[in-house]
Image (tube, rainbow, N blue to C red):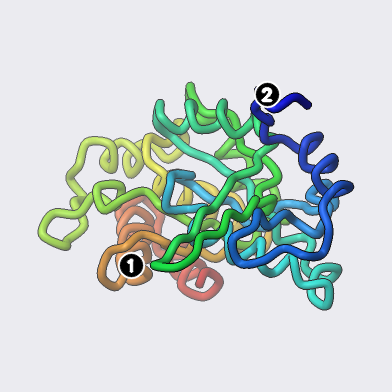
């Protein structure tokens, strides 16, 4: 590579860098993965892969895989990205060109550090009826956690209360057999499928910076489930199986 060439962030470049790097990295150096991302499988499905995600969940999982004493027994906790909006499709296209690698830059008053994160292993196609996402939620029992960064607006709140009358929510309540229009309609549909087919439930994990985010996520999931026809047994199952 000449001095004028800009390296392209992808796994091929990362493997080249791994071979040429040494063990004398300091706090201002580029930190690269010490693990092989091809050995990971997805156990977390993350909806809403924005700029907040790599600085938190993706970084936490990268730290886990970096630890040689914990890596082997946790390789099933890779991240699969997903999204519902047009900018999620743009994000997917960008990350696909990088083999799902991301860079986290940390700075303080005296130092800076860039870390290449390889904890993401896939990103589902975005668009249409989002069938790939619905299928992943419903059928893939390897997915143990569905994490969310969908912003406050993605929870359909009005002064902190769930807007059950929102048109998209009403669609998902009235038409559970049709493609869902919201991520919460998709979650309830997937949980119903898992219950009906005796499949294990997943954990719903809100990563959004809103007060009591876990309670908010639960209130929306349960609000959609309770409003659907023949909901009593599903609500009971969700309360007993979903954390």
Residue at horizontal 65 percent and vertical 39 percent from the top: 100
Q: Which residue is mark 2?
A: 5
Residue at horizontal 24 percent and vertical 47 percent from the top: 153
As displayed, is residue 10 above or below residue 218? above
Residue at horizontal 72 percent and vertical 54 percent from the top: 32
- Disc with the residue nearer the chain's start (2 vs 1): 2
Quadrant of the rendered image containing residue 77 = bottom right
Question: Residue 234 appears at what percent x and percent y?
Answer: 47, 61
Q: Secondary structure at mark 1?
A: helix
Asked if residue 168 can be seen in this view, the reply is: yes
Question: Rounded to the nearest whole Å, what is the CA distance between mark 2 and mark 1?
Answer: 44 Å
In terms of depth relative to the viewer, which is nearer, 168 or 205?
205
In terms of depth relative to the viewer, which is nearer, 80 or 113?
113
- Looking at the figure, which quarter contains the N terminus? top right
Q: Which residue is mark 1?
A: 213
Determine the residue located farthest toward the left in the rendered image: 159
Quadrant of the rendered image containing residue 69 = bottom right
Determine the residue located farthest toward the front in the rendered image: 3
Badge 1: how crowded within 10 Å, few (<14), some, or many (20+)?
A: some
Q: How many marks?
A: 2
């Amino acid at each position: 590579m000449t001095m004028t060439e800009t390296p392209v962030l992808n796994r091929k470049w990362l493997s080249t860098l791994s071979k040429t790097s040494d063990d004398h990295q300091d706090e201002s150096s580029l930190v690269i993965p010490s693990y092989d991302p091809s050995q990971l499988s997805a156990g977390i499905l993350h909806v809403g892969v924005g700029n907040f995600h790599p600085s938190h969940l993706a970084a936490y999982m990268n730290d886990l895989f970096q630890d040689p004493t914990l890596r082997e027994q946790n390789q099933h906790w890779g991240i699969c990205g997903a999204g519902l909006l047009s900018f999620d499709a743009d994000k997917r296209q960008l990350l696909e060109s990088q083999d799902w690698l991301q860079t986290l830059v940390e700075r303080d008053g005296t130092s800076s550090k860039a870390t290449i994160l390889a904890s993401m292993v896939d990103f589902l196609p975005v668009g249409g009826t989002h069938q790939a996402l619905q299928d992943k939620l419903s059928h893939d029992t390897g997915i143990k956690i569905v994490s969310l960064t969908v912003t406050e607006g993605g929870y359909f709140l009005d002064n902190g209360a769930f807007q059950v009358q929102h048109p998209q929510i009403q669609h998902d309540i009235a038409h559970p057999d049709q493609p869902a229009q919201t991520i919460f309609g998709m979650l309830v549909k997937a949980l119903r499928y898992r219950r009906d087919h005796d499949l294990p439930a997943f954990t719903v994990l809100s990563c959004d910076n809103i007060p009591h985010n876990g309670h908010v996520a639960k209130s929306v999931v349960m609000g959609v489930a309770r409003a659907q026809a023949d909901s009593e047994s599903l609500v009971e199952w969700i309360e007993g199986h979903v954390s």
